[in-house]
């Protein structure tokens, strides 16, 4: 069952190179995502498709497939290196944001 999406734009202090951060409810209640909420850096680039490199284009396409696709599309996106290393996940919006900052600090 696909859940209604909730989007929050974070106004907490964060590094300027990840602006804007979007925190959203997981589409599959965390089954593929690893948490009920996820935090994405530089959200406008992904939504508006401002890809500069081939890798960024692939990430944008995978994310759009996740939003509109089936279970296989969700699995593909969340198994990607980008999702593993650059998207925070957690049980709450704050946990997702904190996980994002931890991942990007590595």
Image: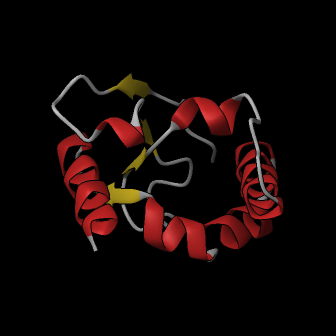
Closer to the camera, 3 or 56? 56
Can residue 70 be seen in the rendering of this structure? yes
Vertical comparison of 60 with 46: above or below = below
Number of numbered markers: 0
Residue at (82% x, 52% y) in the render: 61
**Quarter location, residue 20:** top left
Residue occupying image coordinates x 19% and y 53%: 98
Colouring chosen for the image of the structure: secondary structure
> Which x, y percent locates residue 83?
54, 65
Of residues 13 and 24, the one nearer the viewer is 13
- In the image, what residue occupies the spot 66% across and 39% down? 46
State the residue at coordinates (79%, 43%).
68
In the rendered view, does 68 fall on the left or right side of 42? right
Q: Position of residue 4 (x, y in %)?
A: 54, 30
The quadrant of the image that shows the C terminus is bottom left
Question: Relative to residue 26, is residue 93 drawn left or right?
Answer: left
Q: Position of residue 40 (x, y in %)?
A: 46, 46
Against 9, residue 85 (above or below) is below
Q: For residue 54, what is the image quadrant?
A: bottom right
Q: Quadrant of residue 23?
A: top left
Look at the image and tell me whether residue 32 can be seen.
no
Q: Position of residue 51 (x, y in %)?
A: 76, 44
Depth check, front residue: 46 or 73: 46
Q: Nearer the viewer, residue 19 or 82?
A: 19
């Amino acid at each position: 069952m696909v859940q209604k999406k909730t989007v929050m734009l974070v106004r907490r202090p964060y590094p300027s190179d990840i602006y804007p951060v979007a925190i959203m409810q997981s589409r599959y209640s965390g089954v593929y995502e690893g948490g009920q909420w996820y935090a994405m850096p530089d959200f406008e680039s992904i939504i508006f498709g401002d890809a500069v490199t081939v890798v960024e284009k692939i990430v944008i396409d995978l994310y759009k497939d996740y939003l509109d696709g089936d279970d296989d599309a969700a699995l593909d996106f969340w198994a990607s290196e980008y999702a593993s290393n650059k998207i925070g996940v957690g049980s709450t919006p704050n946990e997702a944001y904190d996980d994002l900052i931890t991942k990007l600090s590595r």
